[in-house]
Image (tube, coloured by chain):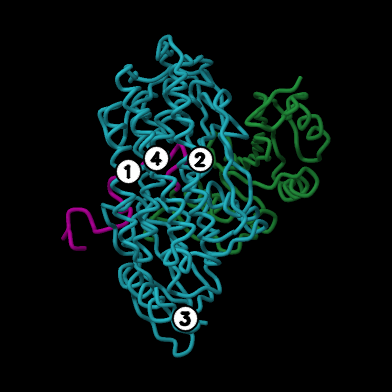
Chain colours: A green, B cyan
Amino acid sequence: MARVQGGERVTVGPPPAEELAVRLRGVEGVSDVVVQSSRRLSARLNPAHVRAVLLRLRDAEGCWHLSAISGVDTRASIEVVYHVSWRDGVVLSLKAAVPRDEPRIDSVVDVMPAANLYERQAHDLLGVVFVGHPDLRRILLNEDWPADEYPLRKDWKPDPKKRYGGPATGGDARG
Amino acid sequence: MAEVEIPIGPQHPALKEPVNFRVFVDGERVVRLDLDVSYNHRGIEKAAEARDFPRALYLIERICGICSHAHATNFVKGIETIMGVNVPRRARYLRVIVGELERIHSHLLWLGVAAHEIGFNTLFMYTWRDREIVQDILEAISGNRVNYGVNTLGGVRRDLTDGLRARILEDVRTLEARSRYYLDVLTQEETFLVRTRRVGFLSRERAEALGAVGPTSRASGIPFDIRRVDPYEAYEELPVEVITASTCDVLGRTVVRAREISESLRIIREAVENLPGGPISVPAPRAAPKGEVVSRYEAPRGELIHYIRTNGTDKVDRLDARTPTLANWPSVVDAMVGHYLADIPVVVSAIDPCLSCTSRITVCDLGDRTKSVLTWDDLRDHGIRFYRERRGV
C-alpha cells in the first residue's frame, strides 16, 4: 500500500516501531521492550549499560536526536528516562532505575552532546549524579537553594522554618 | 584564563526566562560563551502534580505566553491518549487552526524583534502591525489575545461560525500578500543581508549533535518537523511541507520562518475551507488510568515534549516539559564562537529564545583582563554602530 503525502510517495510497511523493537530485544542492557503505539516505544535500561546502548543507537541505528532526559521519582527508585528519536517520528523512552539513596549513572554528554543541559536539570531537581559530566552545576534552582533538597522528589516538602534563598523571612525585605 | 563570577541578580517579573551570558572576547572576537538559564524557575512541573487535569491544563497553558496553545494542546492530547478519548475531527481541525495562527503571530513577532536588534525599525513596525491582524482573529475566536483557553479534555471550547470563517479567509488573503513582501525584503534588502549572511554559522553535523530543533535545525538543512514526521491532531489529513534552508546562518533561520508563515497560511486556508461538521468535544473521564505518554508538538520554536505519567487518579504523577528553547541554547553557544561581539544580539535572537532581553552581558577582554558590564541595549547599539562604521549599513 502506498499513499501520496505532500507530493512525496511514502510506502507504508510494517510500523517502524515494531521493527525497531525486534532489534532492540537483542541489545545487552535493554529489557522489557514495549510497543506503545506505531511511533512510541519504551524499554528498561540497565544503568551500567547506558553509554554502550546510546552509542550503539547513535552509530548502528541512526538515532541522531536525544529529545529529552526526564527524571522521575517512582518512590522505589529514581528513574532516568532517555527519550531518543528517529527521523521517521519514532520515539524510544529508555528507563534506567537508580537507587534513591545513591542515584548515580554515567553521563552521556560525550556520546550525545545534547544531554548536557538535560542532565544538569535532572541533577538539580532530583539529585541524580551523572558521573563524568563536564560541568554538573545547578541549572534551574537558585544558587542559595539548600543542598540535599530536591523538589521533584515525592517526599520533598518545603520546611516553613527554612530559607530557600532570597531575603530572610520576617526580616528586612531588602535582605 | 580567570573565571568571571557574576551574581545572578535581576529577577525581572517581565521576563519569562532570564538568561545571563558570560562572554570571553579577544578584541572583537568571541572566544567562549557561557550561559546561565537559572533563577526564575517557577516550579510548574511540581505544581502540576497537585492539580486535577482541567486545572493543570490552565496552569500548563501559562508555561509560555507566546506559544501557550502549543503547551496546552500537547498536554491535553497526551492525557487524551492515556485516557483513550477519541477527539472529534472538527476539534482536531480547530486545534490546528489556532496552532497555526499562533505560529504566524510568533514568527511575525520574532521577525520584528530580529529587525529591531539590527536597527531596522521600519521592518519591526511593519511586522508588528501585521501581527495585529492575527491577534484580532485569535481574539475573535477565543476572546483572548494570549492564553486562548481553547482546549479542553476531549476537544475544544470554541467553535467557528460561518461569518468568522469568511473573515479568517479574507484576513489570510491579506497576510499572504504581506508574507510574500517580507520574503522579498529579507532576501534582497542589503541592510538585512549584511547583518545576517554567514553570521552565526551552525553546520548540519553540529546542529544534529547539539540537538537543535525547529527553524534553527531546519535552517541547517535538517528536514525535521514534528507535524510531518510524527503527525498529531489533523496534520495527517493536512500534510505540511517541511521548509528548510542550506545556508546554516541567521539569514537561513529568517528565510525558513518567513516561508513557514506562508505555509501556515496555506494550512489555515485548507483547514477553514474543509472544516468538518460534527461536535467540537466529547465528554472525558475525570481520572486517567495508570500509564505514560511522550507527547510531541511542533511549537513555533521547534519540538516541544511533554513526558506524562499518570497513576490512576485525576492528577499527573509526573510531568516533564522540555521546551524548544532549552534544546536550542547549546547551538547559540556554539554558533557564537569566532564571531564579532556585535553579532551576539542577532545570533541569540535567531533561535527565537523565549525571553525578553534585559539580561546583562559581561564582557571580559582577554588582552588587558578588564571586565565591564553591558546591558542588552548597549550591546545592541554597539552592534548597529559597529556595522555602520565598517560596512556603511
Residue range of the region highlighted in magenta in the rendering = A150-175
Q: Could you tell me if residue A130 is visible in this image?
A: no
Magenta span dominant secondary structure: loop
Mark 1 → mark 2, Cα distance in angstroms = 23 Å
Mark 4 → mark 3, Cα distance in angstroms = 35 Å
Query: Which residue matches tag 2?
Result: B304
Q: Residue B131: which disc?
A: 1
| Placement of B276 over or under A46, stated as above or below | above
Q: Is residue A47 left or right of residue B237?
A: right
Query: Which residue matches tag 3?
Result: B28
> In the image, is residue A159 part of the stretch drawn in magenta?
yes
Please identify, in this view, whether the residue under mark 1 or under mark 4 is nearer the observer.
Answer: 1
**Residue count near mark 1 (Cα–Cα under 10 Å), binned few <14, some 14–19, many ≥20:** many
Element type at marker 1? helix
| Placement of B340 over or under B367, stated as above or below | above
Q: Is residue A117 left or right of residue B272?
A: right
The disc numbered 1 marks a residue on which chain?
Answer: B
The lab-note entry on whether marks 1 and 3 share a chain reads: yes
Q: Amino acid at mark 3?
A: Glu
**Residue count near mark 2 (Cα–Cα under 10 Å), binned few <14, some 14–19, many ≥20:** many
Identify which residue is drawn at 52% across, 24% down: B234
Element type at marker 4? loop
Of callouts 1 and 4, the N-terminal one: 4
Of callouts 4 and 3, the N-terminal one: 3
Query: Which residue matches tag 4?
Result: B67
The spot of residue A33 in percent (x, y) is 73, 29
